[in-house]
Each structure stands twice: as C-alpha cells, then as structure tokens.
Image (cartoon, coloured by chain):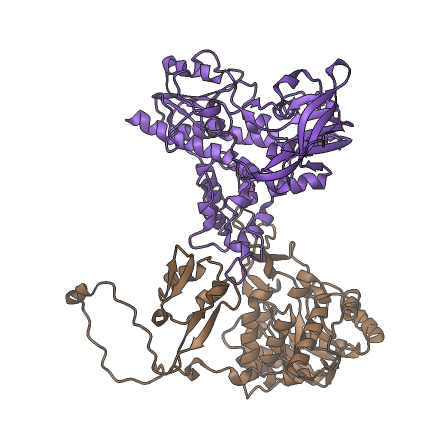
Amino acid sequence: MNPAKHFKQMRKGLDLPQAIAEADRCLLCHDAPCSKGCPADTRPAEFIRKLRFRNITGAIRTIKENNILGGACGELCPTHRLCEKACSARFASLARPEGAERPIQIGKIQRFLIEHSWQIGFKPLQQVAPRAEKIAVVGSGPAGLSCAAELAKGGYPVTIFESRPEPGGVLRYGVVSYRFSLDFLRNELKDIEDLGVEFKCSHPIEGPAAAENLLKEGFRAVFLAPGLWEAEPLNPKAKSVTGVYSSTDYLCGLRDGRFQEMAGRIAGKTIAVIGGGSVAMDCVESAVKLGVRDVYLVYRRSYAQMPAEPDERIEAQEAGVHFLQLNQPVDYVTGRGRRLSGLKLVRTRLGEPDASGRRGPKPVKGSEWVLACDVVIEAIGNRAAADSPKWYPRVKLAGNNLIKVNPRTGRTSVKGIFAGGDIVRGPALVVQAVADGKTAARAIHHYLKA
Amino acid sequence: MATNIDLSTDFCGLRFKNPFLLSSSPVSNSAEMVERAFQAGWSGVVFKTLNSDRLPITHPSPRMHYVNYGGQRAIAYQNVEQISDRPLRHNLLEFLYLKKHYPDYPIIASIMGFFEDEWVYLAKACEDNGADLLELNFSCPHMCIEGSGHKVGQAFHLLERFTAAVKQAVSIPVMAKMTPNITDMTEPALYAKKGGADAISAINTVRGISEIGREDWVPRPNVFGVGAISGTSGPAVKPIGLNSIASMAKCRELGLPLSGMGGIETWVDALEYLLAGATLLQVTSGIMHYGYRIVEDMIEGLSDYMALKGIGRVSELIGKALPHLQETDHFDLNRQGIVQYNLDLCIGCGQCHIVCTDAAGQAVEWDGRRRRPRLIEDKCLSCMLCQAVCPVPGLITFKEMPPGWKRRETAVKDRSLEPELKHEPFTKEGPHECVA
C-alpha cells in the first residue's frame, strides 16, 4: 500500500455484529454510571440499551440529538477516564475492587452507531419552524460546530466563519488522519450542513473589533470559538532555526495539502519531539508512520507525569518511539545556514510537586549533552493568537488571552457575545468543546427570547 | 480424562462405545461424513432418512435459517431439509462401506415410506445391507410431499400399522421417532409400542418460524418468495425435548428404551437427557454449528463428571431425575424461603432492583448513593428473577425461612375506594379438580 494512503486511512471501527456483541456485555444498569461521566451529557446507557433491543435508529438518535460530533467523540474521547471509568461491567466489588473485566467499549459503540447512520442514510435530526434571528459563529472547530448545530436545530439561521480554507478546526488541522480521517469529518460536517448551517471558509474575523462588529452586521448573537492555534515556543529566539517546527505547523502540514512536502522532511531523518501530551504522542507516532530513522520523545519529567493518555503512551512505545525522559531541552545546536544539527539537553531529577501537582524537574548540573537530530517538533502547548484581543476589544479576558465567560451560559462581558472551547478553557477535550457549544446555544436561545 | 469410566451403552441389544450418535440429518448424509464422525468419537449413526426412489426428492433452496439471540449466533436452526435425495443404491452402498470398515459402530437406518409395502421394502433393504436397527421417521414436520412425515406421527393408527408392518418384515430392532408437534407424546408412543416398536426416539424438530424478513415480509428460509412453517431445532428446543423424554420415561405403560435428542451440544445437555430417562443420545444442530469435534468435550466432560461423582457406568445415571419429577400438586407449600444477597460481591448494576420492582414484589430497594440493593425480606416472593439477571454468580442465593414465617401481603393502592367496591365472596362448595 502506498504510505500516504496508509497514513490517511483511519483504523476500522466495529461492525454491526461486533457492536451487538459488545452491547450484549452491557449490564443495563439501573442508574448507569456511564451516563454520568460525559462532559457533553451523552447517555451511553440509553443508546446501548436501544442497540441491545434492536432499536438501532433510536440509538443513533440518542447520540446525534445530544452530540452533533458523536462520531468524532466516539473515536477521539479518552473514554477510559470518562464514560467507561465507572462501568459496572468491570465487575468491581468490595471483594474485588480492581474489577475482573474490561469496561464496555462505549466509545467504539458510539462511533459505530454514527458510522452506521451514514451507511443506512438515517438522519434523525429535525428542524423546528425557521426563526429570523441570524447568529454568527467564529471558528468551525468542535465548539463552533456544536453551537451552530444546536442553534440550527432550533430553527436559527447560523453562519460559521472560518479563517482556514476548510471547516473542522482541530478535527481538520490538528488531528492526524489515521486517527480521524477526512472522509469521517466530511460525513460529520454533512450532517451539520444538512441542518442548514452556512459555512464561510477562508473568512477570518480578525480585524480590529471584527468579532464585535458582527453584531452590527445583522447578527443577533455571536459565538466565539476560534481555538488556540499559536504555539507556545520553547525558546522565542530559536525561531529562525531551520528544522524546528511547532506541533501546529507539523500537524497542519500533514493535512492541508503539504503532506508530501512535510512527509519528505521527516522520512529517513532523526526527529526529536518535545512534550509529553496527547499532541506530542500524535507527533511521534505519525513520524514513525512517515518512515523516520529514529524518533525521540523528549520529556523533562518522567513517564507517570506525562499528560498523554495511557493508551497513547503505550501505542507510541509499541510503535518504536524512544522515550527520553528526565531530559530538559536547553538550546538548539545548529550548523551551516542555521540548520538544526542537534538538541542540547540537560538531565533532570524530579523534585517536589509544582503548581501542576506533579513532581517538578530539577536540572542536574553539568549533565548537558547533545542529541544529534535533523528535525525538532515542539509540542508543548498552544495559546491564543497574540493579537486576538483586538478582534473583540470590549470582551473581558482571563489570563493568557483566554476569554472570560460565565461557565453556566458561555456569556462574555459583552451582551450578545458568547464564547466556548479552548479559547475559554485553554487546551481541552473535543467533548468539552462540544459541551461548551451546546451550553452557549441554549444561552443564546434564552437571550434572544428575553 | 478419567480412565476408569465406562461410557458404553447397551440399547436394544446393541453395544455403543458411548451414548453419543449422529442423528438422521445433513450431518449423516454420506459414508464419507459418517466415517469422519466415527473418527472424531461418535459411537454410531442414525443415517439420513432413506426413501425408495419412487418419488423424487428435491430440496428447496435455500434450506435453512437460524435464530440469533443478541451476539449469540444460532440458538436455534430452522430447516426445510427433506429426506435423503440420494439414490437408495448409493445409500445402501454407504452402509456396506461403514459396516466393512467400522464393524463396531452400529448403523441405525432411518426410513420413511408412504404406504405399508414401501415401509417394508425399505426396512428389508436396510436389514439386508447391514443396518443394525431401524428408526421409523414418523416425524419430519416439513415434507414437501403431502401426507408424509409428521402427518403420520399425528395419525396414531397409521403409525401403529406401519410399525407393525415393518416389525413383521425384519428381525432387527425397530425404533419409532416421534414428533413433538402434538399435545402428549406418550399417546403416539403407546401406539408405536402396540405396533411392536422396541424403542422410541424423540424429538424431531418443532414446527416454527425462525424469522420473518423485515424488508420482504417473507418467513425464512425465503424459498424464492415463499416461507413455510418448518422444523426448529437447536439449544432453544432443549426444554421441549426434555419434557418429551421425561414424560415417556415416567409412563409405566410404555416402558421402552428411549433415544433422546433436541438441543444437545455439551455434556451437560447430554447428562440432563440421561437423567430424564434417555439411554442413547443423538445430535445434529450442535454439529451444524460447531462440527463433529464437539463429541470430544461431551466424552471428556461426562467422564470427568462421573469420576468426580463416583459413578462408574452411564446406566447408573439414566432416569435418575425421574423420582424428583412430579406434578406441581406435590409441592410442599408450607415451606417458604427468600433470596439472600452477599453484597461483598455486588458490582452495583441494579438489575435486581429493576426486575423486582417491575416484575416481582418490589422487595429490592435501591440505595442510589452507595449504588447497592437493599432487600426487604418479607416482600420477597422468592421468584429468583433477581438471581436470573445478576451477573455475579453466587451473589444471590435462596434460603429457607423458619416455619411460620409470613410474607407481607401486596398492598392495596387505595383503600378509600372500598365504598364503591362490588364484591360478594364465592361460597359454593366444589371439587378439588376440574369437572365438566
């Protein structure tokens, strides 16, 4: 198989018999803990029961009505610490607190049901009578899509403004395609388009007060969900080094038409990825798939402190990534023409817990060394665009240029302007963004009715 | 595997290495197949039902369907399989081959005729070519030729006449195979006995419909737009088979050896048929699902069970459940009990609460904070529905309550309606059984 095709192919989900077999394991709990574990209020107990009783269309409806990105969440959610965490099918009891079984694979069942809806052409969502009040959504990531869909279901005409050429936000530009394919995304987006949501792509709302001006352009409410797209740089001075990328550059590059170019810079090379989160894991694993010679994950703390999910860490190691733990980057080593030739590291020891509650790294004096490498990808987090406050000057901010909202409504300090997703929370899960979108949509509805 | 266990079984003067046989069906269609079954461990065969070549046998297509339950495939099969469509000569040649190469493996020839001469002709042909025993197929529920199969099994005098005719024509023993598609199987079995049958086998398949197409509304199997009520088999029919065997085994007047079948897949199923009174066991659906290899686990499982129980011979198991099997009027209603819960094992699913609330005595309350059930003992009906759904074995058990213990009466919802009640107590004396 050609490597690009392989790279872009998402792993297969469950099929109908497999989903039914998994649903059969479900104990159909009286007050199911799974239904209390979803940030977006998905009720797995309900859709699994419906599947179990062959009400497959009803099961699809349960998911889709609650979460317009049910397929994406089914695939991308860290379900083991959300809905699946307290699953009774683990058989945990006083006599056996650790449990004896694995939880029901709720995420996989959810993904199956959504894919099945596309396969059988079942569209459960219905619009109510159209309303006149136009709504603008800034950003077409999970928060924006969720808010737009929720409002469109309520009959509102919704326009999503997206600065990039294609909609989807992080689902389009921030996730590797073997984890979440374009075809899958297109199907999810189609369901949203079918609700009448209008997409205006390559249409940034980024001028002075551009977002606030939408209220003067005929939109009765605005939902801000631009996300976090600027990389936290390790060393602001290192910008000019050839061969250093931010995770955003790298992951976008793999999805925005520059695949061959980006893949060519990785294949056969030695790569170091800095960071220990889910994005870092996506970077190392994708590098392996692109045919690196060696890929190092450089992390200044130890395995247990990594923010990435356990299964992601294991998958990365299984893929052949070398985990360089207790090593803190100090500087880039360059050769001719500021081209990267290595990463200077210092060994660390774990000290006392820091502000994050995790034991903090303490450099070991005199332990500096250089890891020879051709490419470094910095995956240490994203932040709001530096000039984003200018787009909505009246909106009150929290620290780090994040937007301050009432968490129960998504209301900002400006009447008619709401916000959600990473621009409010900082880096968070897709499902949390979905929840924010729904919360804001409900608040917008109340706001317009008042 | 336990080595000191003797699974060999005597039946109508024949010796079988173990009680496990192929029944007359697609699994016993040819010598090539039967040979492999013998090698796998089956002790004998009831060969697929022979016919006289007088009427052509053509199989409907497709022939079979199945019932799935949840993720479990084929808890029942449904078939419109006919009797053998092979020429009689070929089938008889297969007998000769098997007798020549497997002389210690009895061959039971299943036959089906339409009138006396045909039954006699088939019986003699089988006897002449090595069959050790005859099974008269009075029970196929879906013959495409009118008036055959279970139509005979439902017409008791015909059944008796054909049995008698065969019995007079041959010297090998004769077994009549019964249909379950009647009210009480002992009745036709007694007619077979009157006709001279040496043994009874049961059950043939149960008339049923496995599935109706949701798109085309055609019952399955869909034979080009037509479905038919036809034979259902497999694990789902085991309770029906056990009823038939136990009823005939309890019938003193009958007193014939029984060959049991219907949903046998494991040694546990086999054991139940033995305890219910069958001597020889037959299997088809289990093989249709899993292949001949299942006999290995039946042999090993039953042998080990017997060794653990200290039972040396299979014959010591036959009919051992029958003394414990009575009509419901034999129950001692003075003894009552309730369930008890070992909550250390509880995983908090709450299914007990759901079923007790909606289908029983509302005796299991739910502590939502701790996610644990709380039993109100004097409301427990001891229906055991909670045990049926509890996923943890041993958590819910039955315990007898002391004499004099009383269950609480089911509360009346609204006593204030009493003034509107129209009710006089029934006072007439009457008998303790139904009379016309």
Q: Is residue B340 shown above or below B430?
A: above
Q: Which chain is brown?
A: B
Foreground residue among B221 and A26: A26
Can you say which quadrant of the picture contains the C terminus of chain B?
bottom left
The quadrant in which residue B375 appears is bottom left
Position of residue B385 measured from the top left corner of the image (x, y, whole percent):
44, 66
What hue represents chain A? purple
Q: Residue furthest top?
A: A208
Position of residue A274 measured from the top left corner of the image (x, y, whole percent):
65, 30
Q: Residue furthest front?
A: A365
Foreground residue among B20 and A300: A300
**B46 horizontally vs A428: left or right:** right
Q: What residue sits 33% from the left and 74% below the top? A: B407
Q: What residue sits 63% from the left and 70% below the top? A: B264
Foreground residue among A449 and A358: A358
Position of residue A114 measured from the top left corner of the image (x, y, whole percent):
53, 39
Can you say which quadrant of the picture contains the N terminus of chain B?
bottom right
Foreground residue among B150 and A116: A116
The quadrant in which residue B254 appears is bottom right
**A145 horizontally vs A369: left or right:** left
